[in-house]
Image (cartoon, helix red, strand yellow):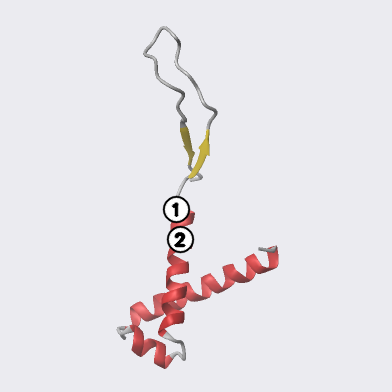
């Protein structure tokens, strides 16, 4: 995805996040809110899913794979294992 398309997608996500909050605070059913705002229920649920996925993606730590390592030959004989490290940007 190009940088322009990414920026447009981010703008749409932000716009839909506001619409989803508006629906939730309106007290209206999704179908009622959609009718009043000229949005199909399909569009509403599609963007709600994308907004939710984007929010989860931002909250998850970055997982960085580390090189395979093997224990000393004097210790238990385990096969190589992969160790993961998480970095949190707080």
- The one nearer the camera, 13 or 44, is 44
Q: Which mark is residue 38?
A: none
Discs 1, 2 touching: Cβ within 8 Å = yes
Residue in the picture at 43% in, 65% down: 52
Question: Would you call the spot at circle 1 few (<14 residues within 10 Å), some (14-19), or many (20 or more)?
Answer: few
Residue 59, label in figure? 1
Place of residue 26 in the rendered image (x, y in percent of width and height, measured from the top left): 34, 83
Camera-nearest residue between 74 and 85:
74
Q: Which residue is mark 2?
A: 55
Task: Tell me how many marks there are.
Answer: 2
Does residue 82 lie above or below 61 as drawn? above
Question: Whole-percent x and y of residue 53?
Answer: 45, 62
Identify the residue shown where x is 58% and y is 67%: 10
Q: Residue placed at 45% from the left, 60% from the top?
A: 55
Report x, y in % for residue 30. 35, 83
Residue depicted at 52% across the width and 71% down the height: 14
Q: Circle 2 — which element?
A: helix
CA separation in Å, label 1 and label 2:
6 Å
**Mark 2 nearby-residue class (10 Å; few <14, some 14–19, many ≥20):** few
């Amino acid at each position: 995805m190009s940088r322009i398309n990414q920026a447009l997608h981010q703008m749409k996500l932000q716009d839909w996040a506001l619409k989803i909050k508006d629906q939730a605070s309106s007290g209206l059913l999704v179908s009622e809110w959609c009718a009043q705002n000229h949005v199909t229920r399909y569009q509403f649920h599609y963007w709600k899913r994308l907004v939710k996925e984007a929010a989860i993606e931002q909250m998850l730590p970055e997982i960085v794979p580390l090189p395979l390592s093997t224990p000393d030959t004097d210790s238990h004989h385990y096969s190589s294992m992969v160790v993961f490290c998480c970095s949190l940007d707080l």
